[in-house]
Image: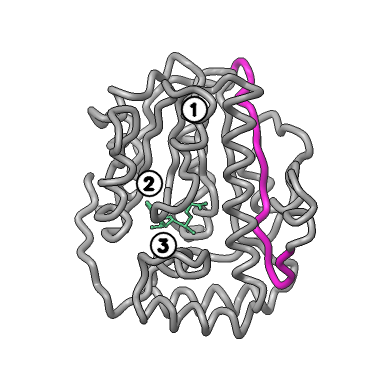
Amino acid sequence: MADNRRVDLSVPSAARMYDWLLGGHYNYEVDQRASEELLKVAPTTKELARNNRWFLERVVRVMAEEHGIRQFVDFGSGLPTQNNVHQIAQAVDPRSRVVYVDDDPVVLAHGQAIFDENDQSVVIASDMLETEYILEHADFRRLIDLDQPVGVLFNSVLHCIPDASGPGDLVTRVVDRLRPGSFVVICQLVSDDAGLRRQVTEMMLEQTHGRWGQVRERAQVDRYFDGLVIQPPGLVDVTDWRPDSELKRRQRSIEWTEYGGLAEVPPGRRSGAAVPRPRTA
Ligand SMILES: C[S@@+](CC[C@H](N)C(=O)[O-])C[C@H]1O[C@@H](n2cnc3c(N)ncnc32)[C@H](O)[C@@H]1O
């Protein structure tokens, strides 16, 4: 089902708060105020957002340069920023193709012009849980050949999905459609501090009027990778995922981190079957 959310500028959104934390301009006063509240609880969250984006840049480059991936799907792509996935991938090979998926109306309004800037990238407006709608979408079919390896990103998005909606099942539904030699990137917000996990989860749920998921423990994120072949250096604070400069190695978040990594889809993993998501209505 296509997403038809309307912009509500009185309610902060995760996409616009993240944009503000990164120093972007696609956000409003409500997003700034909510982010400032978040910084009181987790003061190193700007560093966390920046580290996450640096990780995304590195991991897309690694998939393109070292594994020859030329088609990418970016679930929960966020607002356009510097070095979007298609720019990184097309710097390696201009023929690289990228499908972005997001359900935030502001992302879609600004993203359409920038992500659709050539006929090799497109943004699909959808709740990412609607995997069948996305994988069967005409634009998806035009750009992504599921019989060839794909690089799939769930980068800093699964904490937007509550346990009740099955973030792990979402990953499984997508991975089951990929051929061996495909790659999956997953990272999400974690903390070892149960009090912080609870406090930030409650704060974000209240601020976004329930459009959020939860901060998790590392072991929960580890389970998203079941059946996949995790690539070196393993599952880590993304700051430690093959940092390419001393500055990036040093700049850390303290209270919480983006945790995850890169994994390959092994032979025998693909079912190929379309597994519809059970509908509640
Ligand atoms: C923190 S941003 C991450 C952006 C980007 N992936 C990155 O790592 O820089 C999370 C994004 O996921 C999107 N998102 C959250 N829940 C979603 C859902 N159920 N379906 C589609 N997009 C969603 C939000 O709109 C937001 O743009």
Q: Which residues are magenta?
A: 252-268
Q: Indicate the position of residue 222 as horizontal and vertical percent values.
A: 69, 46
Q: How would you rate the neighbour count of disc 3 (Cα within 10 Å): few for under 14, some for 14-19, many for 20 or more?
A: many
Give the label on residue 25, or none: none
Q: Is mark 3 within 8 Å of ligand 1?
A: yes
In this rendering, the answer to whether 18 lies above or below 108 is: below
Q: Is mark 2 within 8 Å of ligand 1?
A: yes
Please tell me which residue is depicted at 65% across the width and 37% down the height of the picture: 262
Horizontally, residue 38 falls left or right of residue 208, namely: right
Mark 3 residue element:
helix
Q: Which amino acid, by three-letter code, is at mark 1?
A: Asp
First along the sequence among labels 1 and 2: 2
Q: Which amino acid, by three-letter code, is at mark 3?
A: Ala
Residue identifier under label 3 = 15
Q: Nearer the viewer, mark 1 or mark 2?
A: 2
Query: Which quarter shows the N terminus?
Result: top left
Give the label on residue 176, or none: 1
